[in-house]
Structure formats: structure tokens, C-alpha cells
Amino acid sequence: MIAQTLSDKELIANYIAGDESNLQILIQRYKRKVFSYIFFIVKEKNLADDIFQDTFIKVINTLKAGNYNEEGKFLPWVSRIAHNLIIDHFRKARKIPYIDNGYDYDAYDLVKVYDECVETKLVVEQIHCDIKRLVEYLPDEQKEVLKMRHYSEMSFKEIAEQTGVSINTALGRMRYALINLRKLIKENDVIVSI
């Protein structure tokens, strides 16, 4: 059978079994889509090239480690890796301080003003998505109070009335929800600031 006609699953299995050419076929198959996705967001060819290469280095490392389990979903998996690397890039870029070493400068030059650019929105959306995912791991009572407070913007009195508990119990559940959420954030290495 000609390798180009094999499914993603078959190509991956062959690559893991030691046939390196199968990975090249996968890369060729999805190169345009993955690169276009990256370039659409970062809008800089050299940066897109770097992130594209990092994406496939991560793909190779994951496949070689035997940690790939997204059968039949290779392109979405690779796109998610690229997306996460884009997010990581913009998070790191935001942490780099801006310093003007010129002699002729105004104090206002040292203040960087970020407008709501695509990168910032993307990072914020990812942070919200990560937090919402982690909230689902909280015990039901804590999750309920946290959602009522933050998503429904209910007061603790309203939460207590709706759940049939005292205000102190509602406050306690919220306290434990936040403590447990902080632990989950730390355990899952979720970055919650840009």
C-alpha cells in the first residue's frame, strides 16, 4: 500500500514502530493548515516558522514517549499544541519588561499601554477556559457556590437562601472552593495572569 494513502492512525503506528518516513507524510499532509493557523494569529512569518517547528518537535517527543492517545484526531491535537505554544509565546512576551536606554526620553515612554489586541484576547480566553475546566473538579457544593457567586453574581445571602444553608456555610464553601481551586491551578501548572 502506498504510504500517502494510509490513515493518520496508520501513519502514527508506523512511525512509532520505527518508520520515520511516515511522520514526514503526516507533516506534509497538514503543514499548510497548521502553518496558516499559526501565521493567522501571530502575523509574523519568522515567529510562525519558529512556533511551527516547536509544534512538531513537541509532536515528535510525545509520539516517541508513547503518550499519544488521540486516535483519529491528529490534526485537532496538533492544532491544540500549536495553539498552546502561541499562548505561551504571548504570555512570555508580556512578561519581558520594556526599558528605553536612550538619553532623550520622557517618563511616559516607560509605560507600555496594551490595547485589546488579538494576542491578549487569546491569552485571556485560554485562562478563562483553563479555570472553568478546573472548577468542574471541585466538590459539587463548592462548585455550586462558586458558580452562583462569580457567574450569576449572587450575594452570599441569596446563595444561602437558594441552597438552604446559613450565610456562614455559604461563605465557608466559597472559601474552600477558592483554596481547592488554587491547589488545582498549582497542580496543573495553569498560568492565570498575562
Image (cartoon, helix red, strand yellow):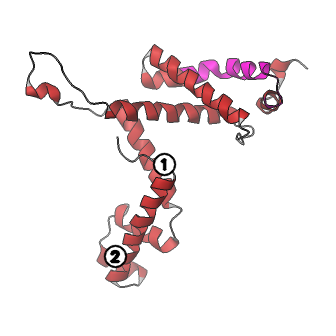
In the rendered image, residue 135 lying in the magenta stretch gets the answer no
Based on the picture, tell me whether residue 26 belongs to the magenta stretch. yes
Please name the residue shown 50% across and 66% down the image. 138
Q: Which residue is mark 1?
A: 189
Identify which residue, 100 or 51, lies in the foreground.
100
Say above or below: 110 vs 148.
above
Quarter of image, res 126: top left
2 left or right, relative to 146: right
Q: Residue at x 41, y 71 (%)?
A: 176
In the depicted structure, whether residue 130 falls above or below residue 97: below
Q: Position of residue 56 (x, y in %)?
A: 62, 25
Left or right of 114, for residue 135:
right
Which quadrant of the view contains residue 71?
A: top right
At x 48% / y 48%, what residue is drawn?
A: 189
- Viewport quadrant of the C terminus: top left
CA gap, disc 2 and disc 1: 27 Å
Task: Check disc 1 and give the amino acid type.
Answer: Asp
Quadrant (top left, top right, bottom left, bottom right) of the N terminus = top right
Dot 2 or dot 1: first in sequence order is: 2
Which of 183/136 is in front? 183
Is label 1 in a helix, a strand or a loop? loop
| Residue extending farthest right | 1
Q: Which mark is residue 171?
A: 2
Which range is magenta? 16-35
Q: Could you say which disc has been placed on residue 25 in the image?
A: none
Q: Mark 2: which secondary structure?
A: helix
**Disc 1 packing (10 Å; few <14; some 14–19; many ≥20):** few
* Three-letter code, disc 2: Leu
x, y percent for residue 28: 69, 17
